[in-house]
Image (spheres, helix red, strand yellow):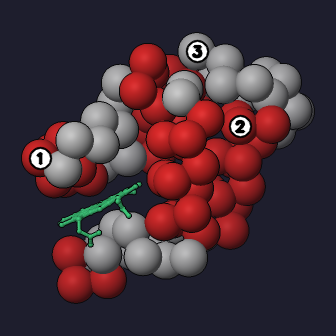
Amino acid sequence: MTTGTTSFQRDILPLFTQTDIDHMAQQGVTLNDYSYMSDPTHAAGVHQQVSQGLMPPPDSGENRWSSDMVALFQAWIDGGYQP
Ligand code: HEM
């Protein structure tokens, strides 16, 4: 991946399952909403949760994000939250 070209629609949205999107919408965290996610505070919160393996919750049955997935999310942040 190249910093600056990571795209929310193309690269980041596919990292979230429909389960992730549905459960987190109930918490007010709209993972599939670019305008929500491109707020640096929201993006940092998501990054913190996935990098620590706290989200998706271990008991949800989903796998924790791989280091490649976390790095891709970080590249999107570093690239300036491209749509
Ligand atoms: C990649 C997937 C997910 C991401 C990025 C994510 C992200 C987050 C974030 C940023 C918070 C806010 C924490 C805070 O306010 O301190 C949160 C809380 C929460 N999430 Fe998720 N979430 C994911 C998947 C899920 C799934 C699959 C479930 C349920 C099956 C879930 C259930 C919850 C619940 C119940 C809370 C509030 C209570 C808590 O902090 O534990 N999340 N999540």
Disc assigned to residue 26: 1
Secondary element under disc 1, as helix, strand or loop, is helix
Counting from the top left corner in percent of width and height, residue 19 is at: 19, 53
Q: Which residue is drawn at 54% across and 26% down?
A: 38
Counting from the top left corner in percent of width and height, residue 41 is at: 55, 41
Q: What amino acid is at disc 1?
A: Gln
Cβ of mark 1 under 8 Å from ligand 1: the answer is: yes
Per the image, the residue denoted by label 3 is: 83
Discs 2/3, front: 2
Secondary element under disc 2, as helix, strand or loop, is helix
Tell whether label 1 touches label 2 (CB within 8 Å): no
Q: Which residue is drawn at 34% across and 30% down?
A: 32
Q: What amino acid is at disc 3?
A: Pro
Regarding residue 18, the answer to whether it shows in the image is no
The quadrant the C terminus occupies is: top right
Q: Is residue 22 left or right of residue 57?
A: left
Q: How many marks?
A: 3
Counting from the top left corner in percent of width and height, residue 37 is at: 47, 31
Q: Is 83 above or below relative to 8?
A: above
77 or 71, which is in the foreground?
Answer: 77
Per the image, the residue denoted by label 2 is: 77
Q: Residue at x 57, y 63 (%)?
A: 48
Q: Distance between the residues labelled 1 and 3?
A: 24 Å
The quadrant the N terminus occupies is: top right
